[in-house]
Image (spheres, rainbow, N blue to C red):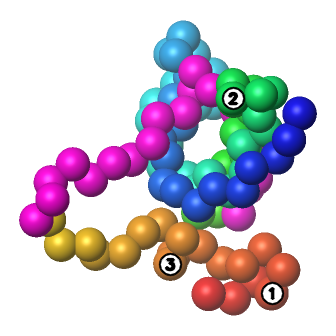
Amino acid sequence: MRIVPVARDVVVKNPTGKGAHAYPTIGRETHTLMFGKTPVKHKVVFADGKILNFPPAWIAPIVNTAPDAPQIGSLVECLECPDTKQH
């Protein structure tokens, strides 16, 4: 097992459609726990500061597929740093 740091915006949704994440929620993935080349657990930070772990089936990366689309920024610019509580 190894922890791989990542920095990407993701959508978290419970595939069963029940519970706290029954509706899609955007967050910032910070780490992925890998078993070989297989992801086991994703650590996600939400805008309200909550940090939760999710199975791979709950995670979908946000991908900009248009090559000429302007890059406006990402969710990480809106999140406070967990250590300093500042932007």
Q: Nearer the viewer, residue 45 or 4?
A: 4
Above or below, 39 against 65 in this view is above
Q: Quadrant of the N terminus?
A: top right
Sequence-first tag of 1 and 2: 2
What's the mark number on residue 77? 3
In the picture, measured across the screen, residue 53 lies left or right of residue 25, that is right
Residue carrying label 2: 37
User: Which residue is at 33% across, 48% downward?
Assistant: 63
Distance, label 3 to label 1, CA atoms, is: 14 Å
Q: Position of residue 43 (x, y in %)?
A: 73, 46
Amino acid type at image mark 1: Thr
* Residue 50 magenta: yes
Distance, label 2 to label 3, CA atoms, is: 29 Å
User: Which residue is at 79% across, 38% downward?
Assistant: 33
Sequence-first tag of 2 and 3: 2
Q: Residues within 10 Å of mark 2 (few under 14, many from 20)?
A: few
The stretch of residues the image draws in magenta is 49-68
Q: Position of residue 11 (x, y in %)?
A: 47, 41
Q: Quadrant of the C terminus?
A: bottom right
In the picture, measured across the screen, residue 69 lies left or right of residue 18, that is left
Q: Nearer the viewer, residue 6 or 17?
A: 6
Q: Mark 1 and 2 residues: CB-CB less than 8 Å, in contact?
A: no
Q: Secondary structure at mark 1?
A: loop
Sequence-first tag of 3 and 1: 3
Amino acid type at image mark 3: Glu
**Residue 46 in sight in this render:** no
Residue carrying label 1: 84
Based on the displayed image, in which of its 4 quarters is residue 84 positioned? bottom right
* Residue 59 magenta: yes
User: Which residue is at 72% across, 43% downward?
Assistant: 32
Q: Position of residue 50 (x, y in %)?
A: 73, 55
